Image (spheres, rainbow, N blue to C red):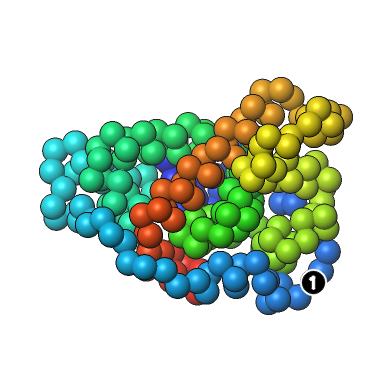
Amino acid sequence: MGLFGKIFGGGASPENKVETPTAPDSDASDDQAWEGVSGQNQMACPIPFVEEDQATGEIAEIYDSLKKAMQVPEVPNMNKVLAQSPQALKATVAMLGELFMGSSLPQPIVSMLLYSISLARRCQYCSSMHRLTCRMVGVDETMLSAVGNNLGSVTPERVQAIVAFGIKAAMSSADLTEADYDKLRDMGISDSEIVEIVALSGLGVYLDIVAESLKIEVDVMVKQGLAA
């Protein structure tokens, strides 16, 4: 279905469906972490967007490919800003394709990992996009609240450990110890998967930096999706 088609085109494709992680029943409306990030005010983006009617050549081709792959009516704001630098746009699209959509890890876990990092780093744009993505791959509101407010309640423990490791890699990578790696290996997580978790954590930080530094406003289509 393409780069983002299985996310924005109706949920995970059959071959990527897995048992969705769970959290104990709780008041999902009391999601303080999400409310704290989503309610932030910020300055307007200081960089002009390259709107679709202004795009030419390679940028126009990337825009067309993105819309078809994501099955959305318009190009996301982050891409419109990155288009000021074709290299930055191409590199970002490639990273998302290889690390996010091409991950060997189950899509709900990948989405929860990126969402948790964006919450920890208080990135409004990325947390909104990742929250919607989580929903589209079957992560419910109770789980979203648990990820941001009570990660220790998430089961299975393997999922909890992956997300916790990813957050630590993103927020304080120098503090990772042998015990952190051993914990993952004891749960059957391979070295290949550990490297991928670290790379995904780096991707999450990268996206947060881009979105927060360039003050990118959450897309209308994302706001509408979250409000639905």
Residue type of the residue flagged with mark 1: Ser
Q: Is 34 located above or below residue 147 in the figure?
A: below
Left or right: 60 in relation to 119 = left
The N terminus, quarter of image: top left
User: In which image quadrant can residue 52 be found?
Assistant: bottom left
Q: Is residue 136 visible?
A: no
User: In which image quadrant can residue 41 be found?
Assistant: bottom left
Outermost residue to the top: 191
Residue at 57% across, 32% down: 199
Percent coordinates x, y for residue 218 in the rendering:
41, 64
Residue at 23% across, 45% down: 84
Percent coordinates x, y for residue 12 in the rendering:
56, 48
Dot 1: element = loop
Closer to the camera in the image, 220 or 3: 220
Closer to the camera in the image, 99 or 73: 99
State the count of labels: 1
Percent coordinates x, y for residue 113 in the rendering:
64, 47
Left or right: 157 in relation to 125 = right
Outermost residue to the front: 174
Instruction: Sort mark 1 into few (<14), some (14-19) or many (20+) by Cα contacts within 10 Å.
Output: few
Percent coordinates x, y for residue 211 in the rendering:
42, 53
Left or right: 183 in relation to 46 = right
Look at mark 1 in the image and give the residue it sits on: 26
Closer to the camera in the image, 16 or 98: 98
Left or right: 30 in relation to 217 = right
Residue at 55% across, 37% down: 202
Residue at 16% across, 48% down: 55
Q: Is residue 163 visible?
A: yes
